[in-house]
Image (cartoon, grey):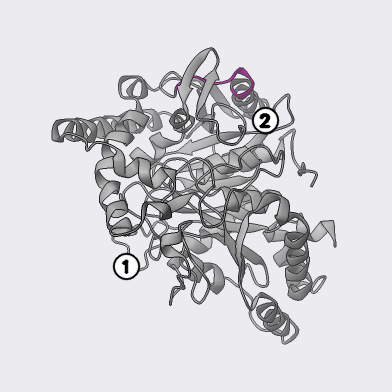
Amino acid sequence: MKPEIIYSDATKLAELIRTKEVSPVEVVQAHLNRIEAVDPKVNAIVTAADGALEAAKAAEAAVLAGEELGPLHGVPFTVKDSIDTAGVLTQRGSPIFKGRVPDADATSVARMKKAGGILLGKTNLPEFSYWIESDNLLSGRSNNPWDLERTPGGSSGGESAAIAAGMSPIGLGTDLAISVRGPAAQTGITSMKATHGRVPMTGIWPHAPRRFWHVGPMARSVRDVALAFSQLVGPDGQDAFATSTVQFDAGIGRQPYRQLRVGWMIGPGFGPVDPEVAATVKAAAEALKDIGVFVEQVSIPALERDFALDVFNRLHVMEMKPAFAEATAGRSQDELYKMAKTMLSLPDTSMKDYIDAEQAAERLCDGYADYFSRYDALITHVLPIPAHKHGVEEFTIDGQTVDATYLQGATVPLNVTGLPGVAMRFGTSEEGLPINVQIVGKWQAESTILHVASLLEGVSPVRGLHPAL
């Protein structure tokens, strides 16, 4: 097995394939070998996609014939198992959907294939994509490749683990409140939740409440996330939220920029934060300042007035419960895991609380709009702590005891408001675990936050680190 293949990013692999330095067959086989070697420990891949090697042979023939090649030609990718893949099992982490094989690809999968990507497999998730750990009755629990006793997060935890462990160079996850950015932080990879509606949710379940759901790229480099996003972005004529035609340039390093204005904060408004994580956010801010970016510590009063996690909980329970109830109607309780049961047992939000929460969400949007009238980006933490042990549901963070939902304190505001955010590693805990920061931008400003992320990546103290599996 060639380490330069399994830990090369997708952009590099595509370049090596175009220049005939490696073949798509060699690349796909190296990743299949890696899956065979390490996935028994990690349990990230739940279904192998039949035909990956055949597709690689066809991709190799296209290279040799001098055909026009897509930007991801011959590069393998993986997909969270809530995202439809034509002819490949998509079981959504539940026995209720065991054996389900979609007829068509989700829009996001179709676009990755159109760019030349080769589907390698499907990755693990919590039941119905609903929790901060990737565990379910159908395919079991995924482990963090940095420490198998810890979680790779949820709900795109199988995807994050596969990419971190070298089983896949790039893939797709979904995000309701934390689910591409949290797992990226727990495994030290890079991911992006774009502005709501920039990437269609067509072919993905659940998508209620669709105004909070996103599908986004996950990879090991900022340039890979930018490249994938450039292929995923844009309306598909099916998702009514996906209407923006704002263009995106994947060449993040080529854009001329005036001096950027960046704020950083760890609170108030996000809940408690571990000192190691807080120090990493500050270090990222100082690193940007050292290379000429205007940076200062800030606060956003709207986040202090309305706690975004509380706003989210009052809104999404009312809108998501009916989808869960419909999917589980007439099914045995033995087919349901703990999160479906929990969701179905939650009391409905009163109409007054629901309306109050709607108004609070609008205030949060206004608060961010005011902030972005003065700044280009915001740096925060992703998670308040590094990856935690499996099954922990209560944490003491900086002296304050909170339940597990508080891990979403800095990520869920972007789902409530629809703002874009990039998660990328910039630190390491005393226990050797990754610590990521989150770069937030104004609506439709993915190019700006990816540029800031690329600047940080260039001065990162943790580039090139991989788990020892």
Q: Secondary structure at mark 1?
A: loop
How far across and down, in percent of the image, does residue 157 sit?
57, 47
Seen as rendered, the residue at the extreme left is 352
> In this rendering, is residue 246 above or below 455?
below
Q: Secondary structure at mark 2?
A: loop
Q: Which residue is mark 2?
A: 291
Q: Which residue is mark 1?
A: 238
Amino acid tagged 1? Gln
Distance between mark 1 and mark 2 Cα atoms: 43 Å
**Residue 411 versus residue 261: which sits nearer the camera?**
411
Q: Give the magenta range.
A: 271-277
How far across and down, in percent of the image, does residue 193 sit?
47, 47
Q: Is residue 5 visible?
A: yes
- Where residue 409 sits, quadrant-wise, is top left
How far across and down, in percent of the image, does residue 167 sit?
70, 58
* Quadrant of the image containing the N terminus: bottom right
The reply, left or right, for residue 163 in relation to residue 125 is right
